[in-house]
Every structure is written in C-alpha cells, then in structure tokens.
Image (cartoon, rainbow, N blue to C red):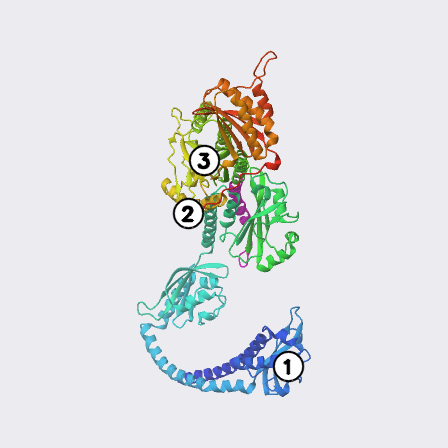
Amino acid sequence: MALVVLLVTCGVIALVLQSERDTSAEARRRSTAVAQTFAHSPGVLAALRAPDPSKILQPLTETARRAAGVDFIVVMDTGGIRFTHPLPDRIGKRFVGEIGPSLAGKVYVESVDGPLGREVQATVPVENADSEVVALVSAGMKVKNVESQVTRQLPIILGAGAGALVLSTGVTALVGRRLRRQTHSLGPDEMTLMYEHHDTVLHSVKEGVLIVAADGRLMLANDEARRLLELPPDVEGKLVSELPGLEPETKALLASGREATDEVHLAGERLLAVNQRPTDREGGPKGTVVTLRDSTELQAVTGRAEVARERLRLLYDAGLHIGTTLDVLRTAEELARVPIPRFADYVTVDLADAVLHGEEPAPTATDMRRAAVCGIGDDHPLSEQGRLFDYLPSTPQARGYGSGRSQLVSDLAAATGWRVQDPERAEAIIGYGFHSLITAPIQARGVVLGMANFWRAQKREPFDEEDLSLAEELVARAAISIDNARRYTREHTLAVTLQRSLLPQAVPEQNALDIAYRYLPAQSGVGGDWFDVIPLPGSRVALAVGDVVGHGLHAAATMGRLRTAVHNFSTLDLPPDELLSHLDDLVGRIDQNEAAESAAGVVGATCLYGIYDPVTRRYVMARAGHLAPALVQPDGTVTFPDVPAGPPLGLGGMPFQTAELCLAEGTQLVLYTDGLIEDRRRDLDLGMELLRDVLTGHPARPPEETCQDVLDSLLPERPKDDVALLVARTRTLPPDRIADWDVPPDPAAVAGMRDAVSAKLEVWGLSELGFTMELILSELLTNAIRYGAEPFHVRLIRDRTLICEVSDGSSTSPHLRYAATTDEGGRGLFLVSQMAERWGTRYTPQGKVIWAEQALPEAVQQPVPSPAAPQAPT
C-alpha cells in the first residue's frame, strides 16, 4: 500500500506539472497561431496602406480576439507604434516587448509586463508581396488567465489521482490472484526456463511479431519486427500511436484490434504484409498478436507487371478507338482523347496545314494547325483548336518535326527553349501547374505529318524515358490512320472536283422556266447523281436528271459520259423516248467495252428526261428506271404523275414510253434522285410522302426556298448517298409574242406570207429584221411546198431570239451543201445558214419542223415577265 500511495502521489505531482506545462504551451501556441492567422488574413495589407489603418483594423482585431479566446491582438508598424489595442487609449503608443526578431522575419514569443499585466505574447511579421516586413502583429494572454486554467484542472487531477489510488489497490489484489492462477503455481526456475525457450524462438524467426495490449500499448516486439519497423530499443510499453516512424494507417490498424489478413502497409521504403489476430479467443488476455512480412520485392514485381498491363491495355484501346473514320480531324481527336487520363492530363495534336487538305506536309514545322485539344478540364491555358503555328527552331516541336525523334521535357519550368514561342502563354501554362511534356512526331511512310504533345500537370509525376517509348508507340499506331485519312481526303477532293466540273456550273438563260437546283455529295464519297438544263429550239427547255449507282471516280466519270451523251442527243432534238433509247444503246456498248477490264460496268444507271414547251404548256417526259417527278399545282396540291417506268439504262431490249402533261402556268416541277427520299430508316413510300408533305401548300414559294426546305426536311445531317434536286416553275410565253399561219400548198402563197411576217415584225418593233427574215422565210417555205407534203404551217416566236418555224407533213430533211456553178438550185439553205444565227430540223409525229433563229437588237431584248406567284388555297 505504501508503494502504491507513493506511486500515486508521484503520478499526481507529475500530472500537475505536466498540466501546467501543457497549459503554458497551449497559451504560447494559441497566441502564435492567432498572431500568424491575423497577419496573413486577406485585407490586412490593404488596410495598412489606408490613410487611417486603426479605423479599419481595430474592429477586426477585437472581433478576432473574442473569437480566438486571447486577451489582446495588437497591430503595429515597424517602429512599434500600435494601430490597435483592447484599450483604445493605448493606440498610437509604443508596443511593450521585443520587436527586433520579428522585424528580421521571425516569430518571437516572450513574457512581459504589459498594459494588461503579466502577459505571454507572440509577435509575427506582416510581409508584402516582395517579402518585405511592413508591419507586426502581436497576440497573447495574461499569465493569471493561464494559471487559472491550471487551477481549474487541479481538482480533476487530484480526483483522478485518488481514483487511481483506489483502483490501483484493487487491481493489485486482483493481479496477484490472477498471476498465481495463470502461472499454474510454477516455480521461478520453471518460469525462467520457459521464458528462455519462448525468447529464443520469438527472436529467431524471420517474421516480425508484435503483441499489443487491449489498451493499445506495445507489449512485445521481436528482432525482425524492430528491424522492419525501425523501432528504438525502449519501444515496449509505449502506445502504438506514439511509435516513431509508423505510417498513420499502420498505427490505426495496430490500435484498432480488428482482424487483418495480408494487408499491405508502407513502412519507410518497405511494403509489409500485416496479419493481426485477437489473443482472447481461448480465454487469454485481451489484445492482439501481429505478424509482419516484408513484401517489398514482391510488390515491386507486381507493380511493374501492373504498369506493363496498363500500358498494353492503353495500346489495345488505341488500336480500337483511333482510326475509326477516314477524317483527319476526327482521327486527331481520337488520338488526343485515348491517353487521358491514364497516361497524360492533356493532349494536343498539331498537324501540318497541308495534311488537313490531303496534301504533302512541309519539311519544316511552319504552318502547323492545332487539330485537337483534349484534357481533364476545360479551363487550361493551352492554345485553342484551329490555331495556326510557325514553331521556332528552339521549341521541342520544331526539333522533333525536323529530326523525326521524340522530345522529352521533364521540367517545363526549368526549360527555356519552348518559352520563346509565346512567353505570356508559357507563363500561364507554368502557373496552371503543367510541369512535364513529351512531343512525338506523327510519322508515317517516312513523312512527318505533325506533332502529338502529351502534357502532365499538378500532382502527376513527370514523364520519364519509359513514358517516352510508350508515347512513341501510341503515336506510331495513330500515324498510319492519319496518313490514310490524309490520302483519302486528297482522293475525295480530287473526285469531288472532277464531279463538280462535270455538273452544270450555271443554269443557261431561257424564258420557259424559273430554275433552282442543289447537289450534295455523300459523306462517304462522290457518287453518280447528275442533272442538266438544256435549251432547245422553239423556246423549249429539256430537263434531265440521272443517277449512276455506286461511288467514287468510276461513278463520277460515268456520270460525265452520260451527261455529255444527253447533250449530244438533245442537239438532234429527239423525243424523250428516242433519246433514252439511244442512251440505253450507248450504256450497253460502254458495259461491253469495259467488261474485259473491270467487272464494274454502268449497270444501275437511271435517267428522267423531259421537254417543256412554254408556247403550248406541254411537258413530255420519259424515264429509264428513275423516280417520277413531283408536280406542285398552282393551288398547292402535289401529285406524282404516272409516267411509264422503263428499265434502267444498259439492259436493252425494252422500249421506252412517253407521258405528256399540260401544265398550268406557275406549276412547279420537282426532279430528284433516290438519295433524297431513300434511307435505311424508312422505305421509299414513306420518303415520297414526306416529300409530298414538304411541298404541299406552298405554291408561291420560290424554287430556291423550295430546294432548301426539301433538303432540310428530308436529309439527315450526314447523308449516306449523294443527292441531286432540280425545281423548275413553269412560265408561259404570252400570246402576243407568237404568230402562226396555215399556208396553202401554192408557191404563190409565199409572197403573201412575206407580207404577213413583215407586218408582224412592224408591230413588234423589229422591222429592221424584216429583210433577213423574209429571205429566210421564202427559202424555207418554198422548199417545204416544193419538196414536202401538206399541211404547211408557219410560226413566228419572239423570245430571247426571233424564231421562224416552217412545218410540213413530210419527214424528208433538207441538207446543207455547196452548189456547183452550173446548178440551178441548192443555194437556199446555204443562204439561210449565213443569214440566221442558228437553224435546224426537228421531227414531229406529223412530219418535221425547220427552224431558224435571229438575234434581237439589244434595245428590244426583254425577257418574258415572270408569272404572278400563285396563291395557296384558303
């Protein structure tokens, strides 16, 4: 009991002393913390620069003093003159205490006799942005307040000591009884021998062993545990939470007492596999036994394997996700997206500007355009996508582009060569946290196409040589895809250029139709869709639209051949069905000629050909495997006329049939190819109904707006097939611009016709053309009466030219020839060809028409006025 009393007394004294020491230390710590916090508070420097700092700082210090639990916070200048004090009358007076160390930039704690009494105070400097001391802040507590805290703690300490005395007495008795029971009444010699055996085994094993009591104290540590954990000799008996050198996670595990199996914890540079089990399962004392095993080498091997596995996975993903399209920009974006965030925080891809257009890149890193920017955030200072660069020779991009070798910049802040490109942006990049860069050339087939830049920022470790090799392999896989996309872009551009050169560049001038058109190539490549507007004699206009199945240069070239053939056949002024027959024979011959060289012929070509006559308002058309046109009537209704469907061009053996329509003035003809209404998501009938819905109810809409509305409503954002669309609104030639006469089969009637024509020309104000027209009419009408058959008819049309037509019931066509000196005839057509601007013959079901055109004087060249736009029905 005496021993216990002595121990308790010593413990109480020690606790009192410790409490006083801790309380004093707490006062010093709190004073220092409050002074430092206020000195670094936002707005303090601004307040010190104010005209009256005390007015701003005094309320702030008093509020902070009450919140922090200190007795005073004093702000002073470098001369020690106070700006603030709990006693306002002390403001402006010199501070009581030592300020020299604080003026040197140090924190100084002291005990002084101040205005409030004996005080413990801490003085800290206030520094500006240039690290100059511009003021001082002191905070502290009165000593009597510190001592009062010790006095308040003393009853608790004494009560705890008394309780410990009583508890110790009871525990001593209980421990004695338990000790005798646990030793099984063994003698000292036996206990010694057992301990020696236990100690020998415990310290010989190559596995660390710890025994931790229920209260978290380390009871035992063998030699291997001391080595692994680097424990000091006197560690036993200490709380595991106080053991030096242990990681917080390891301390928490040892103190928790929970079971653990092969948990990996860090101890210095070692990785330990920790197992922990409780010791009271079979009635033993409460606590835990812990075994430690060094698994550093195993973890290192496992870590390297995991790194290799992750890199292989990244390369595998790159193979899957890079190069999914033949678009250069899309492929560059895929290259920038795949490594984030597993390999880099940000990736930028710079390509030679020529590569984006399918051309060969330049030999130097000039005209480099940023093709892609990807990263873990959007607030980065890297240059935006689309910017054009001329990299300076000192930059890693220029060095890598010129040499074809990757460049590693492990420390961007220390490197200087890359800063000269854009110093301001370089500072922003460093300030954002970027610290490491790999720039790798995108090289394919011996040509450098651009540079891929991998950036790391913030908490990531810098790039190393292994990362450099991974970046090179990653870029190498993407380089082939980018080069393939570049080559495709070049070929696609060539094909589109060829195709557009084969299509009409402008609508020819004519008065029969108001024309608007659109051609959209497919995203996957050029196709064989085409259209044409061909003026014909007699103010008529031919409209053609066709489609060659397939894509690529072959389809575009075939389309050009068909369009040229249609132009050539139309000069013969053939009816639509005959023209398609000739076109069908031509396609068949093309297929036969190309069969030996290529299996891809022109099978699948379609065509719709029609002729509109503004004088009679007749529209005659025929189609070869093509879709019927849509007609928008002046009342806003839409119909699809029943045109006999002939076979596609090139099959042969089947005749083509025509359909003839009489169109009201203002009717809109809508000709199109199948790419407009056919889609994988809908069938043909649904597409035609959608087209009907777009066209219905808009008779007054101009053809240009009709084209745009149709494309916006029916086509997806990226059409799979090319589309040709032609919209024509009909006009009618006014009756006062047409004159026609039936002529009796008598040569004497020619003189009367000359007089009638001259009179009509006088009415039209074209009397100056009278002599020439009389001569042309005399020759054509005389030949018709002499060599042709009844009935005879003369028609005069005033359009963009003056047209004279002589028709008869014979199919015999005159031919131009040179008459011999002794010939009495044969000179008439020669005179006609010399006097007329153009002349020719066309055949009709009733016979033929011979026509001749004369140019009108500029003063009377007035186009036919457009018809009034029809109104939609109400």
The amino acid pointed to by label 1 is Phe
Magenta segment includes 758: no
Q: Is residue 28 above or below residue 327?
A: below
Can residue 409 be seen here? yes
User: Which of 813/810 is in front?
Assistant: 810
Residue 715 lies in quadrant: top left
The residue that label 1 is drawn on is 83
The amino acid pointed to by label 3 is Arg
Tag nearer the camera, 3 or 1? 3
Q: Viewed as shown, does residue 429 lie left or right of 307?
A: right
Q: CB atoms at circles 2 and 1 under 8 Å apart?
A: no
Q: CB atoms at circles 3 and 1 under 8 Å apart?
A: no
User: Which of 358/582 is in front?
Assistant: 582
Q: Which badge, 3 or 2, comes first in the chain's sequence?
A: 3
SS for dot 3 = loop
* Residue 161 screen position, x and y as percent: 43, 84
| Magenta span | 457-483
- Where the N terminus falls, by quadrant? bottom left
SS for dot 1 = loop
Tag nearer the camera, 2 or 1? 2
Q: CB atoms at circles 3 and 2 under 8 Å apart?
A: no
* Residue 863 screen position, x and y as percent: 55, 38
Can residue 109 be seen here? no
Q: Is residue 831 above or below residue 728?
A: above
Magenta segment includes 468: yes
The amino acid pointed to by label 2 is Gly
User: Which of 491/162 is in front?
Assistant: 491
Q: Is residue 95 above or below residue 523?
A: below
* Residue 428 screen position, x and y as percent: 61, 58
The residue that label 2 is drawn on is 697
